[in-house]
Amino acid sequence: MNKILIALGFSLLSAYATATTPMPTPAQACNYKAEQQGLVGAEKEAYVKVCLSTLQTADMAGKCEASANEKKLSGAARTSFLNKCVATLRTAEKAGRCETSANEKRLAGAAKTSFVQKCIKTLNAAEVAEKCEISAGQKKLAGAAKNSFVSKCMRDASGTSQ
C-alpha cells in the first residue's frame, strides 16, 4: 500500500512539474518571434525593441481600459481618457527609472528634481529617435536619405521647424 501511495505521489509530482512549466518572459517571447521570422542582427534587435514596447503599451492600455470601464466612459470621452491615461503611465514609468537613477547617484533636493526632469526629457527624445530609426529601417533608407528622414522625423515629433 505504501509503495502504491509513493508511486502515486511521484506521478502527481511529475504531472504538477510539467503543468507548472514557467511562462517565457516577454523578452524571450519577442526573441522567439524574431527567430521564427528569420531575423538576425540589427533587424532582430529592432524587432525585439518594438515587440517589447508593444507589449508594455498593451499592458498599460489594459490598465487604462479597466479604469475607463469602471468610470463607464464611452465615445470621445473614452478615447481621450485612454490616450491621456497611457501617456501618463508611460511618463510615470520613465519618472520611476529616473528616480531610481537619481537615488543611485545619491541626489537630493533641487539637484534630484533637475536630474529627473532632464532624464525624462532625454528618455522621451531617445524614444522618438528610436521610432524614427525604426521607421527609416522599415522604409529601407540608407546613407544621406536615412539621415535626412530621421532628422525631419525628430523635428516633426518635437514640433520645431528649421
Image (cartoon, grey):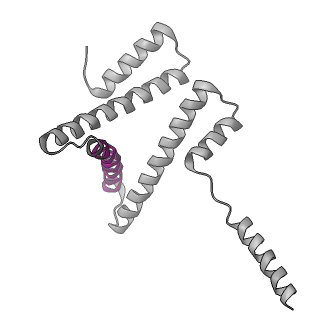
Q: Position of residue 42 (x, y in %)?
A: 57, 25
- Which quarter of the picture shows residue 73? bottom left
Which of the image's four quarters has the C terminus?
top left
Instruction: Choose between 38 and 106: the one closer to the eye.
Output: 106
Image quarter of residue 14: bottom right
Residue occupying image coordinates x 46% and y 48%: 56
Q: Is residue 1 above or below residue 151?
A: below
Q: Quadrant of the rendered structure where residue 121 is?
A: top left
Q: Residue at x 51, y 37 (%)?
A: 50
Q: Does 82 sit left or right of 22 as displayed?
A: left
Q: Position of residue 13 (x, y in %)?
A: 74, 74
User: Residue 41, image x and y in percent?
Assistant: 61, 25
Query: Which residue is outermost to the top?
Result: 144
Helix, strand or loop for the magenta stretch, by majority: helix
Residue that appears at 68% across and 36% down: 35
Q: Does 94 lie within the magenta span?
A: yes
Q: Residue 94: percent from the left, percent from the top?
A: 33, 43
Check the image and report above or below for 139 versus 16: above
Q: Is residue 109 left or right of residue 1?
A: left
Residue under the image location 32 percent in, 24 percent down = 156
**Residue 82 or residue 43, whichever sits in front:** 43
Looking at the image, is 41 positioned above or below residue 115?
above
Residue numbers of the magenta segment: 76-101
- Inspect the magenta stretch and tell me whether residue 40 lies in it: no
Q: Is residue 133 above or below residue 49?
A: above
Say whether residue 68 is left or right of residue 21: left
